[in-house]
Amino acid sequence: MTFGTAVRFLNRARTGRSSPANVPVLDPVWPLPRCHESWSSERILREFAKYDAWHYAYQFEGGISPALSRYQQNGWAGDIDRPLRRFRHFMPHLVKAAGGSLRGKRVLDIACNSGFWSVQCSLLGAEVMGFDARPELIEQANLIKSIVGCQSLRFQVGNFWDMTPGSLGGEFDIVLSLGILYHLSNPLQALQRTKAMAREYILLDTEVYPSQDPVIKLRWEDPDYIRSAARSGIVAIPSKNAVELMLKDLGVGDSYEIPIHDDMPLDYREHRRTSWLVKV
């Protein structure tokens, strides 16, 4: 089935006229493996304790969850399984579109945080570059990389607005834009810059303003915790229709909204967050 055919099937599925394309089930690698016996539980706990906050409640083989207490302290305990449910939501669509495998694909993870998505793509066989504006998050990402032992994975500190193919060693087959768009001030320019990095696909997942109109809501955001923008200033939250209008303006090859299922976090089910697979 071609990408365009899959899009038509999925679009009809949302209106109830047809079943969605046959997208295979794909689970994340979880708990994460430990690459070497030198990464004892005591050592992992010691290294994790160097950081006050973690965005993901990482778990490793052997039943160790070193970030769980800090995750709970930040009031996020109900979201422990959130990244796993999000993975099962949109990653199967990406892997299917990429030919059934990420092996050999070059992947860019924008605003990679501590590297959850980068590591998962690396474990699926991709060559991955991840960057984030916060140096402490890149330290965390490199810690996860060391424990898991991903050799085809590289992290660096970087600002979104400095991102160019030249600064990151060329274009990428796949670009992950997962939870960054609504932390930026100009979504159209942000999508233009993201598209310039991609050769084949963009996986776009973002908070959206709950309106039927193609509008953008502005708000002020301070860098008071690791889920926030890296600097104080105005950020813009586009509605779903605004995102689709911007994708049309960019002249992407094709795109479709990834349909949600019952086991999705509340913000997806309430249409406050949406995912798209974009063929550039």
Image (cartoon, grey):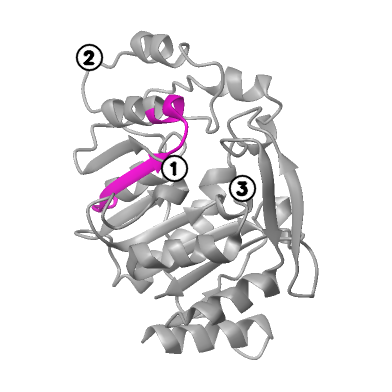
Mark 1, Cα crowd under 10 Å, few <14 / some 14-19 / many 20+, is some
| Mark 1: amino acid | Asn
Q: Which one is earlier in the sequence, the residue at label 1 or at label 3?
A: 1
Name the residue at 56% across, 70% down: 258
Q: Which mark is residue 261?
A: none
Location of residue 97 with respect to 103 vertically, above or below = below
Camera-nearest residue between 80 and 117: 117
User: Is 41 left or right of 180, judged from the image as shown?
Assistant: left
Name the residue at 23% across, 58% down: 170
Q: CA distance from mark 3 to mark 2?
A: 38 Å
Res. 225 visible in picture = yes
Percent across and percent down for residue 153 are 25, 41
| Mark 2: amino acid | Ser
Name the residue at 51% across, 53% down: 178
- Residue 17: in magenta span: no
Mark 2, Cα crowd under 10 Å, few <14 / some 14-19 / many 20+, is few
Q: CA distance from mark 1 to mark 2?
A: 34 Å
Q: CA distance from mark 1 to mark 3?
A: 12 Å
Mark closer to the observer (3, 2): 3
What is the quadrant of residue 181 in the picture? bottom right
Q: Which mark is residue 159?
A: 1
Percent across and percent down for residue 21 are 48, 80
Percent across and percent down for residue 134 are 47, 31
What is the quadrant of residue 62 in the picture? top left
Camera-nearest residue between 222 and 3: 222
Location of residue 198 with respect to 108 vertically, above or below = below
Residue annotated with mark 3: 183
Stretch in magenta: 124-138
Residue annotated with mark 2: 38
| Mark 3: amino acid | His
Q: Secondary structure at mark 2?
A: loop
